[in-house]
Image: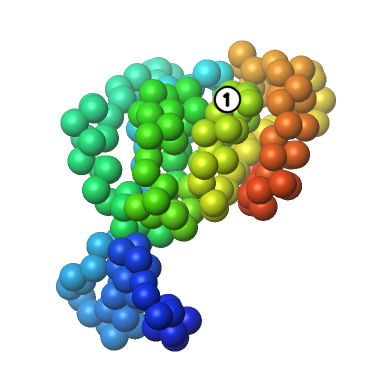
Amino acid sequence: IAQLEAQPQLNAPEANRLQNLKECASGATKLSSLPCNYTVTVSHKCNIDCFMCWQRDEHGNYDQTELRDDVVQKLEGIYRTASALHWVGGEPFALRPVHQFISNFNTEQNPNLRLMATTNALLLKSSVLEKLARFKNVSLVLSIDGVSKETYEYIRTGGKWETLLEGLPELSKVATELGWSVDRKSVV
């Protein structure tokens, strides 16, 4: 709180965060500030089919529904005051609304937005990395299982080990240059 209060002028997201922190610290049960951190599941659609995926219904099918455009549009307003936005899915980078967001979001309105995504990394091509590079603060969680072609392709049905390995060096280079946070998660 003190660090934010010490700043001479706060932008809208910082002012909202300060208000949120003050309200939470005071034990307020009703907040006038907006939430600071959002996790958005656009859809459970994915470009691969992992056998341990929890996003199936009782019959083993994925819900193919996507957030409607009008719902996604309503979210635009909250992104302007958010501290962090975490895209999850399915595979976020297989979804049109995520691409629209990373292409069209006005980063001047919220220059310090922490943009996060949990991804299988198969779709992180140069064109996607270029769009993500517009954001100052990017955190990626790479969901990768297996350290061999056989294990990886057994678990990640439809995923190609070679495709994964092909994209990782460029991701690593861009992430290092831009100071992105990149973590790897796997199922044990």
Does residue 115 lie above or below 173 as drawn?
A: below
Q: Position of residue 129 (x, y in %)?
A: 59, 33
Q: Position of residue 54 (x, y in %)?
A: 47, 33
Q: Residue at x 39, y 23 (%)?
A: 96
Q: Residue at x 67, y 52 (%)?
A: 179
> In the rendered view, does 127 fall on the left or right side of 79?
right
Any part of residue 24 in sight: no
Mark 1 secondary-structure assignment: helix
Does residue 35 lie above or below 175 as drawn?
A: below
Report which quarter residue 145 is drawn in. Answer: top right
> In the rendered view, does 54 fall on the left or right side of 130?
left
The front one of 38 and 57 is 38
Any part of residue 88 in sight: yes
Would you name the residue on which mark 1 appears? 127
Q: How is the model colour-coded? A: rainbow
Q: Position of residue 131 (x, y in %)?
A: 52, 33
